Image (tube, rainbow, N blue to C red):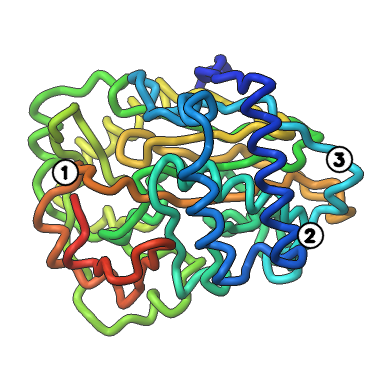
Amino acid sequence: MTTGPAPVRELDPYAINELSQAAQKILAEFGGSATRPELLERVAETAAALSGRTRHHCRPVDTPDGLFVLRGLPLDDADVGPTPLSWATAGDSAAEWDVTLLLLATVMGNPIAWRGQQDGRFVHNIVPSPGHEQEQTGASSAVLLSPHTEDAFHPGRAHLLMLACVRNHDRIATTAASVRRARLDPRDIATLSRPALPILPDDAYAEARGFDGRPPDVPTLWQSEDGLTLRFDPAYTPLDEATPEHRAAYGRLTDELARVSVAVSLEPGDVLVVDNDVVVHGRVPFQARYDGTDRWLKRASVRVPGRRTRPAAEAEEHGYGQAAVQAYDPHDSDEARDR
């Protein structure tokens, strides 16, 4: 893994002011809470009216890196309060950032939530939590969070993952690796393009892990119209059930992703935008203090209407009984969504 600069888009003063004022106005209207359903409608209306200058910063990922950092939004460490000890106790902490992230997400696509995760919120709080230090979830700290596709187990997973940095005193790095930077043998691509193994739900989805149904086998790699894409989560893929050929190819892909991985240390106010079809992300281990100063991110997941980057066979998957809820089109079912 290398520590290198991620592509950065510096927000200009006009865009910063426009986004800040819009978020503050929406939050004032809804009483300081970003969880009320009516707020989503106001966010959609406001996002549609944002200037072309602001929207230009939110244009699609446009390099093989598969990610960029939006930089420049102001954040006062004292104003946001202490880092919560878990998502469940976060409440409306740093709610202006929830709204700001929803505005940005709505310009880029359609935010989604999961009924089975963080009480169905559209913005998640990612903080280290006591008792979860060793898990392969965002609540962990003491272990390497293995590089993975966000919500890889589900056919309705996000096209874009957004991570807004609220606090990162220790400059703890998010890791990221683009499959389009990797050098892969055509034979390995062919092997990993065949559906051979399932990807199981991670520990954040307790209900999904108890789902009574045969896990579907899915491909790890496939060619989309604009290049190679992947669906990757080794921590929840039963590789011991694969053939030796498949395990070897998967291992070489893992090694290549490690070779091209970069470490991105987000600064407060940064928003990392990751193409979830191209980039796997993770996090380096760290020692949590649980004293109100630990790393704190806000996370939003975004589907891009009309984007066709997924194999058609995904439409037949059961998703382990989990439903991805789209913010602005509740009538768009899993079966009808664009791929």
**SS type, badge 1:** helix
Closer mark to the observer between disc 2 and disc 3: 3
Residue 261 in sight from this viewpoint: yes
Q: Indicate the quadrant where residue 177 lies.
A: top left
Closer mark to the observer between disc 1 and disc 3: 3
Q: Residue 169 versus residue 99: which sits nearer the camera?
A: 99
Q: Which residue is mark 3?
A: 77
Is residue 213 toward the left or the right of residue 165 in the image?
left
**SS type, badge 3:** loop
List x then y, in percent, for residue 56: 46, 25
Q: Amino acid at mark 1?
A: His
List x then y, in percent, for residue 43: 55, 54
- Alpha-carbon span between mark 1 and mark 3: 48 Å
Instruction: Say whether disc 1 or disc 3 marks the residue closer to the N-terminus.
Output: 3
Instruction: Say whether disc 2 or disc 1 marks the residue closer to the N-terminus.
Output: 2
Q: Is residue 73 above or below residue 305?
A: above
Q: Amino acid at mark 2?
A: Pro
Q: Amino acid at mark 3?
A: Asp
**SS type, badge 2:** loop
Q: Residue at 26% across / 56% down in the picture?
A: 240
| Mark 1 crowdedness (10 Å alpha carbons): few <14, some 14-19, many ≥20 | some
Q: Which residue is mark 1?
A: 246
Q: Residue at 36% across / 18% down in the picture?
A: 63
Q: Is residue 55 above or below residue 42?
A: above
Q: Which residue is mark 2?
A: 84
Q: Residue at 76% across / 53% down in the picture?
A: 94
Residue 233 in sight from this viewpoint: no
